[in-house]
Image: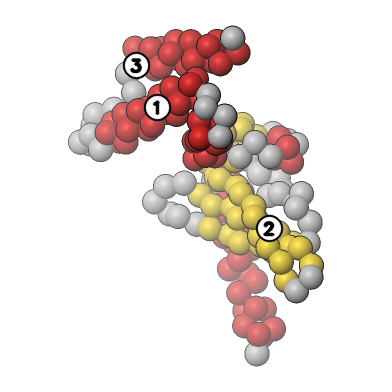
Amino acid sequence: MIARAASRTQDYAAAVYEEIRRAPVKHLDETGFWVGTRPQWLHVAGTVGSNGLVHYRVSRRRGEVLTQAAHIVMHDHWTSYFQMPGVTHALCNAHHLRELTSLVDIDGEAWARRMRTLLRKLCHQVNLALERPAGQTGALPPDNIRAAERQDDRIIRDGIA
């Protein structure tokens, strides 16, 4: 019964996978889990936006990423994603915030606290911009972006020092 049901969904799963592969922006992640005594990896690929497609795939290998992806791929800093040819990489701020929180809580890094505050503030500004009525821009003004870049540079310089 399980095999019959699985065979009936193969075409649908393949179509979802293809839509995600071609989407202008997609996000990728993976997490490990155990089946008995064997490690497995759950690979997740999804689209950003209103269509909300998600594809789950289980593999015994961690390094199996979305093949022949196009456009923008958002992910954590995992090395395998950077091996994907022909895509623009966007790094996930949820992962950044988690790492910055560790640097604040464990190492007491002041620069990490400032960077975390900046990222949260920018996220809030972008969310407000996206809520504007139709016809108004959903982007941050260029002056805000330049100011944020200058602040980011200062925080990075302080962290290096």
Point out which mark residue 32 bears: 2
Position of 81 with respect to 37 (left or right) is left
Residue in the foreground of this view, choosing between 151 and 137: 151
Residue 77 is drawn in which quadrant? top right
* Residue 58 x %, y %: 69, 64
Q: How is the image coloured?
A: secondary structure
Q: Secondary structure at mark 2?
A: strand
Quadrant where the N terminus is found in the figure: bottom right
Q: Residues within 10 Å of mark 3 (few under 14, many from 20)?
A: few
Of the two numbered discs 2 and 1 on the same chain, state the one appearing first in sequence: 2
Of the two numbered discs 3 and 1 on the same chain, state the one appearing first in sequence: 1
Q: How many marks?
A: 3
Looking at the rendered structure, the kind of residue marked 3 is Asn
* Residue 105 x %, y %: 51, 35
Residue in the foreground of this view, choosing between 105 and 159: 105
Q: Secondary structure at mark 1?
A: helix
Residue 55 is drawn in which quadrant? bottom right
Quadrant where the C terminus is found in the figure: top right
Tag in front: 3 or 1 = 1
Q: Are marks 3 and 1 in contact (CB under 8 Å)?
A: no
* Residue 103 x %, y %: 55, 31
Position of 114 with respect to 90 (left or right) is left
Residue tagged 1: 117
Residue tagged 3: 144
Position of 49 with respect to 158 (left or right) is left
Look at the image and tell me whether residue 84 can be seen: no
Tag in front: 2 or 3 = 2
